[in-house]
Image (cartoon, rainbow, N blue to C red):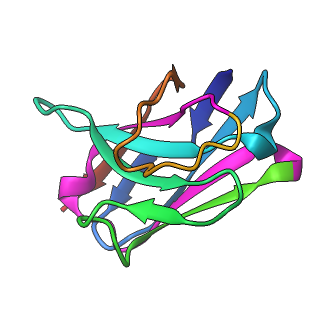
Amino acid sequence: VQLQACGGGLVQAGGSLRLSCAASGRTFSRLDLGWFRQAPGKERAFVAAISWSGAPKFYADSVKGRFTISRDNPKNTVYLQMNSLKPEDTAVYYCATSGTAFYAGDLSRSEYNYWGQGTLVTVSS
């Protein structure tokens, strides 16, 4: 599976960004997709995930109510809409998938085997 993330940039606190991740190499509609982030000096952390069927969705507590994950199967793309951004959201954001068709586990705790390159999000105060 190949994953290509984009959409990062510089935004002021309180602003919004939408990240996109295009996938290829496997049947997209059968795959779970997740977003992770790694802030400077910190470990990579789970942000959000969506199952192959579109539900359920999983969110880290720190982004609940502000971020929304969605998918567009005809476009082989998963999105992360980020609203009310805070400086602490600054990080490199990565998309990933387990690569297992019809995976039905807890995506906040799953093993992700395929990763895209990161896209940098910088939130200024």
Frontmost residue, 37 versus 104 = 104
Residue at image location 82% in from the left, 51% down from the top: 73
Instruction: Please state the horizontal and vertical placement of residue 54, each as a whole percent of the image.
Output: 67, 62
In the image, taking residue 124 as reference, residue 46 lies left or right, namely: right
Q: Residue furthest right?
A: 74
Left or right relative to 54: residue 85: left
Image position of 3 with respect to 28: above or below: above
Image location (x, y in percent) of residue 7: 56, 45
Q: Is 30 on the left or on the right of 48, as rendered?
A: right
Q: Which residues are magenta?
A: 74-100
Q: Position of residue 46 (x, y in %)?
A: 32, 46
Percent x, y for residue 120? 39, 36
The residue at the far bottom in this view is: 65
Q: Quadrant of the N terminus?
A: top right
Residue 7 visible from this viewpoint? no
Query: Is residue 123 at all visible to an observer of this figure?
Result: yes
Q: Quadrant of residue 63?
A: bottom left
Residue under the image location 73 percent in, 45 percent down: 77
Quadrant of the snapshot with the C terminus: bottom left
Does the stretch in magenta take in 96? yes
